[in-house]
Amino acid sequence: MEKRLYTHTGTFNLECGGKLEDIQICYHISKDFDPYAPNSKKVIWITHALTANSDPTDWWDVLVGEGKYFDPRKYTVICANVIGSCYGSTSPTSINKETGRPYLLDFPKTTVRDIAQCHHLLLKHLGINYVDLIIGGSVGGCQAIEWSIMYPDTIKGMVLLACNHRFTPWGSAFNESQRMALFSDNTFSAQEYTITNNKVVTLGGKSGLAAARSIALISYRSYKGYNTTQYEKEQDCIFPQRAASYQQYQGKKLVDRFCPYSYLSLLNLTDSHNIGRGRDGVDNALRMIKANTLCIGIDSDNLFPPQEQKYMAEHIPGARFTEITSAFGHDGFLLEWQQIKDAIEKENLI
């Protein structure tokens, strides 16, 4: 797949009342895509989760890539980075034209609807009239369902993985705990940065981000998963260290690749998810969906349990629900590729 940038010139008004000028959207697309040539290939749009990027062959390589189920040679495969993320789209490290400095903590709050709107702008820029299949897990699924409501004639088929119709108090509690971790690091509020090779590099917030990731990871995994992979081999150990070391490792791993200010922005984005807002409730919003929809739940998912996907399937016209099995909780949507593939094939969605 090929990495590209699209700049939408002018003012982009945000749902919360803020605005961004000349937003930039980083996206990956099949290498042979030509917007000026007739394209008979089916369009597969992949929406990414919280800290992923626009290259699904990087984070979902079990399903996306040459010779894989979503083969970019067979289909026009597209994935766009959300605004607020640190992987090429407009974000907290972008320069605020009014101040001449990076936004950092002043980056305006964005919502899932804002993401659906800006990615629809990208779709129009590419000259594509509709998407044959949109698929996303976790916050990616939230983007997909919002898009299918805002632009119902654009989405023909949809797979919603491990997501819901409205972010729950359970999920918001995890998010607030992560925000508390970020702000408990005094270097985060200091907002220090440097510019290297014309790129803003943030200097603080690393300890807070590592702690926030540790909190999040517990919500992504399961009791069985931790007890299987992090169990102490030493039978007589007094103070277990394996799980603790794993949490430290995962925290550092995110710090090495992600911006703490983008992380805050995306936590706020997730909290905004509520398809019923301004639409007379979630049930009415679900009835607006025209896409041929499959909702997939994971039996061990504690963050978005299967009853949430089942509820959506019961209220989206013609939708179906299926449950897959995984020992890895919410993260099963990234790992259980064979079950996901089988479920999509069974429903003849592409």
Image: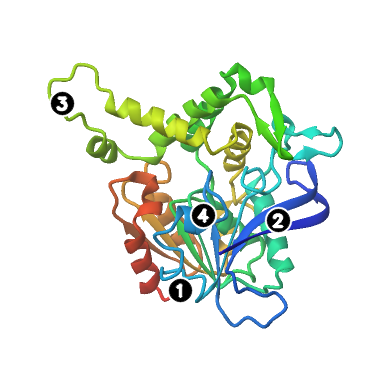
Image location (x, y in percent) of residue 134: 54, 65
Residue at 59%, 25% in the rendered image = 205
Q: Which of pointers 2 and 3 indicates the residue nearer the eye?
A: 3
| Quadrant position of residue 202 | top right
CA gap, disc 4 and disc 1: 16 Å
Image location (x, y in percent) of residue 284: 58, 58
Q: Mark 2 or mark 1, which is nearer the start of the sequence?
A: 2
CA gap, disc 2 and disc 3: 52 Å
| Amino acid at circle 3 | Glu
Question: Looking at the rendered structure, which numbered label has been put on residue 234?
Answer: 3
CA gap, disc 1 and disc 2: 25 Å
Q: Which of pointers 3 and 4 indicates the residue nearer the eye?
A: 3
Q: Nearer the viewer, residue 281 or 97?
A: 97
| Amino acid at circle 4 | Gly
Relative to 314, say whether 223 is above or below: above
Q: Mark 2 or mark 4, which is nearer the start of the sequence?
A: 2
| Amino acid at circle 1 | Leu
CA gap, disc 1 and disc 3: 48 Å
- Please say if the residues under marks 1 and 3 sit with CB atoms less than 8 Å apart: no
Q: Mark 4 or mark 3, which is nearer the start of the sequence?
A: 4
| Residue holding disc 2 | 118
Q: Nearer the viewer, residue 28 or 324?
A: 28
- How are the residues colored? rainbow
| Residue holding disc 1 | 349
Q: Residues within 10 Å of mark 3 (few under 14, many from 20)?
A: few
| Quadrant position of residue 313 | bottom left
